[in-house]
Image (cartoon, rainbow, N blue to C red):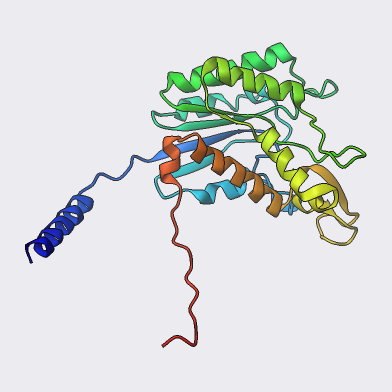
Amino acid sequence: MRTHLLKIAVGLALLWLTAFATPPAKITVYLIGDSTMSIKEPRYYPETGWGMPFVYFFDESVTVDNRAQNGRSTKSFLTENRWQPVTTALKEGDYVFIQFGHNDEVPTKKTYTTEAEFKANLLRYVAETRAHKAMPVLITPVARRKFDAAGQVEGTHNVYSEIVRATAREQQVPLIDLDRESQALLQQYGVENSKLLFNQLQPGEHPNYPAGKGDNTHFNELGARKMAQLVLADIRALKLELASRIVQRAAAKTVDPQAR
């Protein structure tokens, strides 16, 4: 009897403490990067940046502010004054997820950034994020869909991805190696099935692309969700405080109609 009463008392005490617990402070997760992460205009659907489904993973204490833009590099994001508004808004406890490389690495693009400039820009993003007591997270550029004749995925960001990795090690910044992880995912899908993750359309299949589309860089809704899930898994694996703010939903229970 005493044991039973003690259990009830402990339970009531825990309920009382929970009722008066301080809710977690509200934070913002800023996403800065390129078109593989960005929010798409309806005229480009089903093209989808992985930052779009990413916003639904967290509870009400988190606001995901996706500042990624199509065609941007570490350099153009700075020169177009897209970074300064983020630093102005940053507060202690916020996060900045930094994913560039697609447009930095192409010498024929105006957004081209040399290897040295790329690293210097990453260091600036990291330092200025930390100056506001926020947490930088470096992300290697997500893989393109490219296979060799033997059906093996080929990396297309090798040099710039390694710069991101090296910067993360040197600066002790959390790293999400999305390049390697997305390559592994594409390998699992294989040459043909991996098309299901990208903005690949036959002529007449979608009104936004009447002539069809053969895009091996940008994702459709499924591909964006798969990439966002890779990022989510790394948030947990890195044991970031942000992981505690991931929405926890109970698994749906199957009801047996024969049960009485």
Image-based side of 191 in relation to 126, left or right: right
Q: Is 28 left, or right, of 123 in this rendering?
A: left
The percent coordinates of residue 167 (x first, y second) are 60, 18
Left or right of 161 in this view: 133: left
Residue found at the far left of this picture: 2
Q: Residue furthest top?
A: 116
The C terminus lies in quadrant? bottom left
Q: Residue at x 60, y 24 (%)?
A: 81
* 250 is higher (above) or lower (below) than 226: below
Q: Provide residue 102's location: percent of width, then percent of height.
A: 74, 30
Quadrant of the image occupied by residue 211: bottom right
Q: Is residue 77 above or below residue 14?
A: above
* Residue in view at x 71 percent, y 27 percent: 101
Horizontal and vertical percent position of residue 136: 51, 26
Number of numbered markers: 0
Residue 79 vs 9, above or below: the answer is above
Q: Nearer the viewer, residue 180 or 25?
A: 180
